[in-house]
Image (cartoon, rainbow, N blue to C red):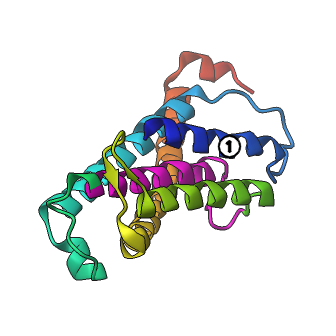
Amino acid sequence: MVLIIAILNDGTIMTISKDRVRPSRTPDSWKLNEIFATGIVLGTYMAIVSAVFFYLAHDTDFFTDAFGVKSIKENDRELMAALYLQVSIISQALIFVTRSRSWSLVERPGFLLLFAFFAAQLVATCIAVYANWDFCRIQGIGWAWGGAIWMFSMITYIPLDVLKFMIRAALRATTSRTRQASPLSLFKL
């Protein structure tokens, strides 16, 4: 299943070269602190969201109560299909957060990137909904569960932008404190 996610992600990643972005007016430099901090924080958030999703689907009646779907608590193969779809959606949707400097829902990506994302997620959704693959130990979960997972993923997507802004603000504050404390800052014009 990880291989399928990787192949679908590659198709979307290849379209970034044709993405609709505004060029910077000044030369950019690698902001490794921002890249590492963003990767660590957003990756941790997404891992927690996936663990919470699994807990809610496996140990509670949250999805049954909130979305009216059948329980999949007792069926590990359906749980794996559901978890596959949730991980696929949230991990690939992350590209919209990381490509934008502002709110990801405000800065429209290129049509090719949007098409690649939705095509890949349509394939992932159809796999989760219909596939009964013994070699992957998954069983189709049906369209009701597919819709519930899409709703869950859209709701858990929203904090990604907020976290991105918090990381940038924290790094700016740290950088300005470091510059003020540096003895070399006395010699800057």
Q: Name the spot of residue 100 as percent of width and height, x first.
A: 67, 52
Q: Nearer the viewer, residue 111 or 29?
A: 111
Judge whether residue 127 is colored magenta. Answer: no
Dot 1: few (<14), some (14–19), or many (≥20) neighbours within 10 Å?
A: some
Range of magenta residues = 78-107
Tell me what residue is drawn at x 51 percent, y 61 percent: 126
Q: Quadrant of residue 72?
A: bottom left
Tell me what residue is drawn at x 67 percent, y 67 percent: 106
Which quarter of the rendering shows the N terminus? top left
| Residue 174 in sight | yes
Q: Quadrant of residue 110?
A: bottom right
Tell me what residue is drawn at x 53 percent, y 21 percent: 182
**Relative to 69, is 59 on the left or the right?**
left
Looking at the picture, which amino acid does disc 1 mark?
Gly
Which quarter of the rendering shows the C terminus? top right
How many marks the image carries: the answer is 1
Prevailing secondary structure of the magenta residues: helix
Q: Name the spot of residue 139 as percent of width and height, x first.
A: 33, 56
Judge whether residue 82 is colored magenta. Answer: yes
Mark 1, residue position: 11
- Disc 1 is placed on an element classified as helix
